[in-house]
Amino acid sequence: MKKIFLCVLSAILIILSFPKTSFWFLAWISLVPLFLAIQNEKPLNSFLYGTITGLVAYLGILYWLVPTFSAAGEPKIIGISVLLLLSFYLALYYGLFCFFYSLFAIRYSLFAAFFWVSLEFIRTHLFTGFPWALLGYSQWNFLPIIQISEFTGVYGVSFLIILVNLTIVKIIKKRTFKGAATGFLLILICLIFGFYKLTTYHLPLTTYSISILQGNIDQYKKWDEKYEREIIDTYTELAGRPSSVASDLIVWPESAIPGYLKIEKKYYDWISQLAQKTKTQHLVSSTDYKNEKLYNSAFLVSSDGKITDEYSKNHLVPFGEYMPLRNFLSRFIKVVNEIGEFFPGEKYNVINSSAGKLGVNICFEAIFPNEIRKSVKNGAEIIVNLTNDAWYLKTSAPYQHFTMNVFRTVENRRFVVRAANTGVSGFIDPAGRIQSKTEIFTTTVLTDKIQHLQELTFYTKFGDVFAYLCLIISIILLTFRKKFDRL
């Protein structure tokens, strides 16, 4: 029972590290109880303890799945089932890490950190990927340490957290600081670099003004014709406010139009006339239908009321925008989005606006670092995230989703402009500082200044080199494990 208690304690510390609480400092000791529990344990026992820890942690982090499925009209039992299944799947990564850790014993602390990053990287890509709540994301509000993300992505921060946890365990077990110097020296170097970046980072003097419209439209109203006039009036009023009209660009949240902008004349005329009246460009999100396929898209409407550019979402949400194994599962779970099954776009194109070149991503795409960097590498000067987090209600999910955008700014050294239907909307600068943000479930306009940036970071140019390096080292260690055991 003592070891189960240690596993649950680790899980609680992990949960508290993430939003809403965001006690980032707890992450640096969160896995110490788990690692103490698996000392001298056989690999299979360690796998079990790791899985228990991961399961409890993800049940606490992803609890919002239950109200989300309820908001989509599904029975609560479906939401509970999905929460349990997804949490168990993610917990297996904790179990696998503990299994590998026990194989190599405590003296290989540095090697263990390579395994952790490898597993996070695999989770980002396997089965279309679900990199929600990677350990590094807990540090979104500890800005000095996350500055290394311009080289390593979020994975480098996860690496440091694991290394510190393992170093603390070594100190506790051996009652000596011998061998701890490497970990703490690496942390010190990263902190010095981070503080240096934060104090010396300079932005261009030329600024551009962008307004975000947070319509705060109830999820039940978005596709109900009875509320069409209410939605139109809300966005017309927000777009007509003085701060909006004075902006270089007005940004709307995901699926703001209650229909099809390009093929329904009444909506096209509304947006076209609104753009001409405000004399401002609008980035508007709408469902699109072309070649007998549905797309989740964003359109740039010029100040003379014409659509001049567009982007269609590439990375779709499983069970939200498309149904994996549709023919089988549709007998048990309704499609969450009532419009139908979406298809992915074909390119990470850049939208040329009066406020700069926009790298647009929609909702779920913001949590995939490699996909965001593609748009920046293709010329984006500003990262724009359009989302509809109304599904999440007043849970921790809107905050977890928002804070992952902090890493996208640092990785690529670009401003992030985030427009969310019910919040959190906001502006984040290239050092990860939140310039301004909204409260959730408020109807408002948020206006702020941004700058164009063209310089490419190491991460933007070369991507997940650090994660691949960790993966290669992990494979080598596993392949030649017996030789390392004799060292």
Image: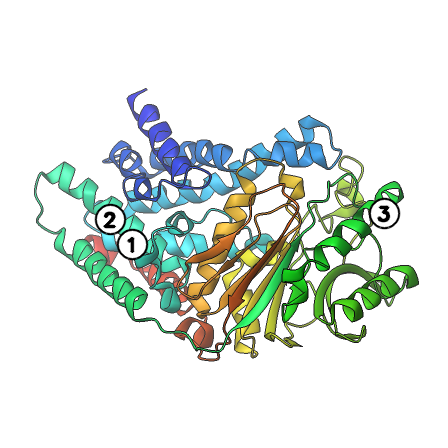
Label 1: element kind: helix
Q: Residues within 10 Å of mark 3 (few under 14, many from 20)?
A: some
Q: CA distance from mark 2 to mark 1?
A: 6 Å
Against 169, is 260 above or below? below
Q: From the image, which quarter does the N terminus lie in?
A: top left
Give the spatial CA distance, label 3 vs label 2: 54 Å
Q: Amino acid at mark 1?
A: Leu
Seen from the viewer's position, the closer of residues 412 and 229 is 229
Residue 481 drawn above or below residue 79:
below
The residue wearing badge 3 is 228
Question: Which badge, 3 or 1, is on the more N-terminal residue?
Answer: 1
* Residue 353, visible in the rendered structure: yes
Decide if residue 325 is on the left or right side of residue 124: right
The answer to whether mark 2 and mark 1 are in CB contact below 8 A is yes
**Viewer-side residue, 296 vs 388:** 388
The C terminus lies in quadrant: bottom left
What amino acid does circle 3 point to? Glu
Q: Name the residue furthest right.
A: 265
Q: Which residue is mark 2?
A: 164
| Residue for badge 1 | 160
Left or right of 192 on screen, residue 343 = right
Where does residue 353 sit, x and y in percent of width and height? 65, 76
* Gap between marks 3 and 1 measured at Cα: 50 Å
